[in-house]
C-alpha cells in the first residue's frame, strides 16, 4: 500500500514538472508572437514593480544596517573595521540583495498571481476567454513573466543601493566610522564578477516567481479552497526554487571567475 502511494506521488510530481515546463515554454514563445498586449505588460509592471517598492526599500535599508552592525562587531576584533563597507557591498550585491528581494516579491506577487488566476479558473473566466478565441497564456501569463523579470532586475539594483546606504548610515551614525572611507571601500573593491552575479540572479528569480505563480493559478481546482491551496503552494515552491537556483548560479559563476 505504501509503495502504491509513493508511486502515485512520484507520478504526480513528474506530471507537474512536465506541465510546468510546457506552460513556461509556451509562455516564453508567446513573447515573440503578436499581439504583444503592451498595456497588460505595463499594468503588471506597475503592480509588481511599483507596488513592491515600499517593502523592497525597507527591507534593503535595514538589511544593510544589520550587516554593518554584525560585520563591524566581528571585524573590530581583528582591527579591520575599515573594511565594513566592503563586506556590506559584497554581501548585498552578490547574495543578500537578490535573494531577499526575490523572496519578498515572491511572497507578495507569486501569491497574488496564483490567487488571481485561480479565481478566474474557478469562476470559468478562463474558459470564456478560450471560447472567444483568446489564448490565456498569451493574455494572462506572458505579461506577468515579462513584467516580473524586468521589474525584479531594477528592484534588486534599488535594494542593493539602499542596503549600502543603510549600512553607511549605521556605520557613520552608530559606529562612528568615517563615511568617505565606508563608501570608497564599498565600490572600489567590487569587480565585474561581483556585479555579474548580482545582475544575473534576478533574471532567473523573476522567471521563477512569475511562472510558478501562474502555473499554480492555472491548475487550480476545487473552488475557493483550491485557490487557497494554490496560493500557498506558489509561495512555498517559488521560495524553494529561488534558494536552489541561487546556489546553482553562485556555484557556476564562482567556478568560472573564482570569486
Image: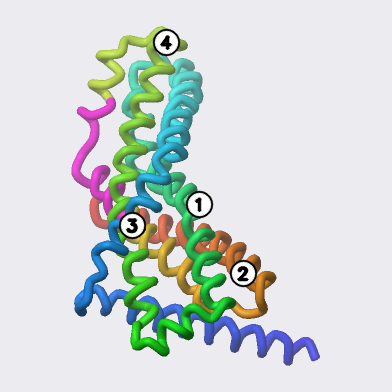
Q: Nearer the viewer, residue 78 or 242?
A: 242
Secondary structure of residue under mark 1: helix
Name of the residue lying farthest toward the top:
176
Looking at the image, is mark 3 or mark 2 earlier in the sequence? 3
Are the residues at dot 2 and dot 4 in contact (C-beta closer than 8 Å)?
Answer: no
Within the magenta stretch, is there residue 16?
no
Looking at the image, is mark 1 or mark 2 earlier in the sequence? 1
Looking at the image, is mark 1 or mark 4 earlier in the sequence? 1
Looking at the image, is mark 3 or mark 1 earlier in the sequence? 3
Image location (x, y in percent) of residue 190: 23, 35
Q: Which residue is mark 3?
A: 43
Q: Nearer the viewer, residue 243 or 256?
A: 243
CA distance for labels 3 and 2: 23 Å
Q: Nearer the viewer, mark 2 or mark 4?
A: 2
Q: Which residue is mark 4?
A: 173
Image location (x, y in percent) of residue 245: 42, 61
Mark number for residue 227? Answer: 2
Point out the image quarter for the N terminus: bottom right
Secondary structure of residue under mark 3: helix
Looking at the image, is mark 2 or mark 4 earlier in the sequence? 4
Report whether 121 appears left or right of 159: right
Image location (x, y in percent) of residue 141: 38, 71
Within the magenta stretch, is there residue 194?
yes
User: Quick check: 121 above or below 48?
Assistant: below
CA distance for labels 4 and 3: 40 Å
CA distance for labels 3 and 1: 16 Å
Q: Which residue is mark 1?
A: 108
Magenta-drawn segment: 186-201
Secondary structure of residue under mark 2: helix
Amino acid at each position: 500500500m505504501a509503495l502504491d502511494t509513493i508511486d502515485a506521488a512520484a507520478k504526480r510530481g513528474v506530471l507537474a514538472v512536465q506541465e510546468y515546463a510546457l506552460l513556461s515554454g509556451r509562455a516564453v514563445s508567446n513573447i515573440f508572437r503578436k499581439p504583444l498586449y503592451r498595456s497588460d505588460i505595463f499594468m503588471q509592471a506597475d503592480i509588481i514593480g511599483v507596488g513592491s517598492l515600499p517593502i523592497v526599500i525597507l527591507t534593503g535599508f535595514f538589511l544593510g544596517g544589520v550587516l554593518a552592525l554584525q560585520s563591524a562587531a566581528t571585524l573590530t576584533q581583528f582591527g579591520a573595521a575599515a573594511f565594513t563597507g566592503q563586506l556590506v557591498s559584497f554581501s548585498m550585491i552578490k547574495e543578500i540583495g537578490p535573494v531577499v528581494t526575490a523572496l519578498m516579491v515572491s511572497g507578495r506577487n507569486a501569491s497574488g498571481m496564483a490567487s488571481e488566476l485561480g479565481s478566474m479558473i474557478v469562476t470559468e473566466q478562463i474558459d470564456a476567454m478560450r471560447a472567444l478565441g483568446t489564448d490565456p497564456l498569451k493574455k494572462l501569463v506572458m505579461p506577468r513573466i515579462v513584467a516580473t523579470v524586468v521589474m525584479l532586475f531594477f528592484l534588486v539594483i534599488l535594494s542593493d543601493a539602499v542596503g549600502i546606504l543603510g549600512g553607511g548610515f549605521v556605520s557613520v551614525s552608530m559606529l562612528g566610522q568615517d563615511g568617505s572611507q565606508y563608501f570608497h571601500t564599498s565600490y572600489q573593491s567590487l569587480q565585474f564578477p561581483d556585479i555579474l552575479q548580482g545582475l544575473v540572479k534576478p533574471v532567473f528569480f523573476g522567471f521563477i516567481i512569475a511562472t510558478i505563480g501562474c502555473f499554480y493559478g492555472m491548475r487550480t481546482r476545487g473552488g475557493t479552497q483550491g485557490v487557497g491551496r494554490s496560493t500557498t503552494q506558489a509561495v512555498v515552491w517559488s521560495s524553494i526554487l529561488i534558494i536552489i537556483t541561487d546556489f546553482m548560479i553562485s556555484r557556476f559563476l564562482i567556478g568560472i571567475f573564482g570569486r
